[in-house]
Image (cartoon, grey):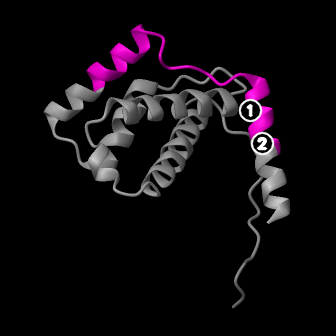
Amino acid sequence: MSIMTQTNLPIVALKNTVQSHVLEQTIFISILEDLRKVPNLEKLRNDVELVNHVCNLVENMMSNNSKAKIKIDKKKLVVNILTKLFNLNPQETTFVETSIDHLFNNDMIVKQHILRKVFNITSAWVIKKLN
């Protein structure tokens, strides 16, 4: 009996809810992995700056990966990320939701400018090649 190394499934583009689910999970996992690298992260449990950082990460990852207009509840995604990271209780979840509303209403969640993205990608590539 041989083990198949290749699948015979046709390549079909993901659409609608499946595409949005895959994108949401990809962003969720990427941000969780990134945040878990931060030393002493537990000290930032109720920090508004961390909430702002996660909001900005979600916003920029959505704009980078979304060619089509995919509907994902960004606020819910940020709350889910922080809940998974810290096991938030209902009071802390309410605090995070209120913080997100405050950040959004005061225009503190921003997309990176395209030139900044190009600079970051280019500098990361140069650093990788030099090391």
Residue 78, placed above or below residue 8: above
Which residue is at a point 14% across and 31% down the rendered structure image? 91
Which residue is at a point 46% across and 33% down the rendered structure image? 53
The amino acid pointed to by label 2 is Ile
* Magenta region: 97-122
Which residue is at a point 50% across and 45% down the rendered structure image? 31
Q: Quadrant of residue 98?
A: top left
Q: Quadrant of residue 93?
A: top left
Is-magenta flag for residue 99? Answer: yes
Determine the residue located farthest toward the bottom in the rendered image. Answer: 1
The amino acid pointed to by label 1 is Lys
Residue 69, placed above or below residue 40: above
Q: Nearer the viewer, residue 114 or 130?
A: 130
Labelled pair 1, 2 in contact (Cβ < 8 Å): yes
Instruction: Identify the mark at residue 66; answer none if there is no mark.
Output: none
Which residue is at a point 77% across and 42% down the rendered structure image? 121
Instruction: Identify the mark at residue 117; answer none if there is no mark.
Output: 1
Q: Nearer the viewer, residue 27 or 46?
A: 46
Q: Secondary structure at mark 2?
A: helix
